[in-house]
Image (tube, rainbow, N blue to C red):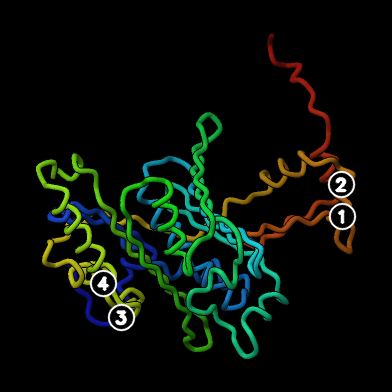
């Protein structure tokens, strides 16, 4: 186990640390995000009541995605009829994360009340209203896309995730999530963390001979230990993740695996926007023109704006011609 004295343990920033409690037949994840959140959230200038749910959703996305075996994109999407209409975050297999939110400023101000700016505890019903939580795994054109959808039930995102695991008949799972924004020298910084434990199948855990009552007791112990983690511990950038796991589970000798890095990166490109525009009739693009007459398309995730004049559009909508030099 490594130790750090003073300063931030950079190896813990924007990482997922998988672990396993062999004595309890439980596997888990400790996710901590910081600089990646700054790069994504701070550029949008979201109100705090929108930014914190997005930070929590991003760390939940990283937690769930890295617990699956897939080669593609894992997407977490929350939609509702409340002040926050839509929240989307996704993570690629190689660790690229991004996210954005859509909200109604007027509805948000009314929901928060005078003088309040942060999302209240148990904010899901107040800020999202009636809606749904969807998880999607997309592994490319020639594979079947998996999607799990559950209603938004619960006061927190962790509660909603628990609803998903219960309704989808997944393995018993416990999740704890927290996020906070601090200001240092006038600059905002985000820290978010998620801690997950999941009961392993008897065969995978090598505990076929353990009776059901003992398995239940072991599972209950793991959940209690997970829940004992304080928000201060989870968000303390100076506390190494290995030290946190040892504090929580030292009696059961947590076995740790290689960290998985997470980093902020958007997948938008001019070529992708070209394909999107090509799927729209050209006359329908007039509503997208800015004051200079160009068609402007802004990426919701990274706020990059792509501008197209009429000559650019001519190229996009030019009919394709066969390659006459290619032998038949």
The percent coordinates of residue 1 (x first, y second) are 16, 66
Which residue in the structure is indicated by mark 1? Answer: 287
Left or right of residue 211: residue 238: right
Sequence-wise, which precedes: disc 1 or disc 4?
4
Left or right of residue 53: residue 108: right
Which residue in the structure is indicated by mark 4? Answer: 240
Sequence-wise, which precedes: disc 1 or disc 3?
3
- The residue tagged with tag 3: helix, strand or loop? loop
Left or right of residue 291: residue 167: left
- Front label number (4 vs 3): 4
Left or right of residue 25: residue 286: right
**Mark 1 vs mark 4, CA separation in Å:** 51 Å
Query: Which residue: 64% across, 85% down?
Result: 113
Instruction: Determine whether label 4 and label 3 are within 8 Å by CB.
Output: no
**Mark 4 vs mark 3, CA separation in Å:** 11 Å
- The residue tagged with tag 4: helix, strand or loop? loop
Which residue in the structure is indicated by mark 3? Answer: 7
- Depth check: give the residue in front, 208 or 259: 208
Callout 4: 10 Å neighbours few (<14), some, many (20+)?
A: many
Instruction: Determine whether label 2 and label 1 are within 8 Å by CB.
Output: yes
Task: Indicate whether 23 appears above or below 226.
Answer: above
- The residue tagged with tag 1: helix, strand or loop? helix
Instruction: Determine whether label 1 and label 4 are within 8 Å by CB.
Output: no
Instruction: Determine whether label 3 and label 2 are within 8 Å by CB.
Output: no
Query: Which residue: 24% across, 48% down?
Result: 200
The percent coordinates of residue 206 (x first, y second) are 14, 43
């Amino acid at each position: 186990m490594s130790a750090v004295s003073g300063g931030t343990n950079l190896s813990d920033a924007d990482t997922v640390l998988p672990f396993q409690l062999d004595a309890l037949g439980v596997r888990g994840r400790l996710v901590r995000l910081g600089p990646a959140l700054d790069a994504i959230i701070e550029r949008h200038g979201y109100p705090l009541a929108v930014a914190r749910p997005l930070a929590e959703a991003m760390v939940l996305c990283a937690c769930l995605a890295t617990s699956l075996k897939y080669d593609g994109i894992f997407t977490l999407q929350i939609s509702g009829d409340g002040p926050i209409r839509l929240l989307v975050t996704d993570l690629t297999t190689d660790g690229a994360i991004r996210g954005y939110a859509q909200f109604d400023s007027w509805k948000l101000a009314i929901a928060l009340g005078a003088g309040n700016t942060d999302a209240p505890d148990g904010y899901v019903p107040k800020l999202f209203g009636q809606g749904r939580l969807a998880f999607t795994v997309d592994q490319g054109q020639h594979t079947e896309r998996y999607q799990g959808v559950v209603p938004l039930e619960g006061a927190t995102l962790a509660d909603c995730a628990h609803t998903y695991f219960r309704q989808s008949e997944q393995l018993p799972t416990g999740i704890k999530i927290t996020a906070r924004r601090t200001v240092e020298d006038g600059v905002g910084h985000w820290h978010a963390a998620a801690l997950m434990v999941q009961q392993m199948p008897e065969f995978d855990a090598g505990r076929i001979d353990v009776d059901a009552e003992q398995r239940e007791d072991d599972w209950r112990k793991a959940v209690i230990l997970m829940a004992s983690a304080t928000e201060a511990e989870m968000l303390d950038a100076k506390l190494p993740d290995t030290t946190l796991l040892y504090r929580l589970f030292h009696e059961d000798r947590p076995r740790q695996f290689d960290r998985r890095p997470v980093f902020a990166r958007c997948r938008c490109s001019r070529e992708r926007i070209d394909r999107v525009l090509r799927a729209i009739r050209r006359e329908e693009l007039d509503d997208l023109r800015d004051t200079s007459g160009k068609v402007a398309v802004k990426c919701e995730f990274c706020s990059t704006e792509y501008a197209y004049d009429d000559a650019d559009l001519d190229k996009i909508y030019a009919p394709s011609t066969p390659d006459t030099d290619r032998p038949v």
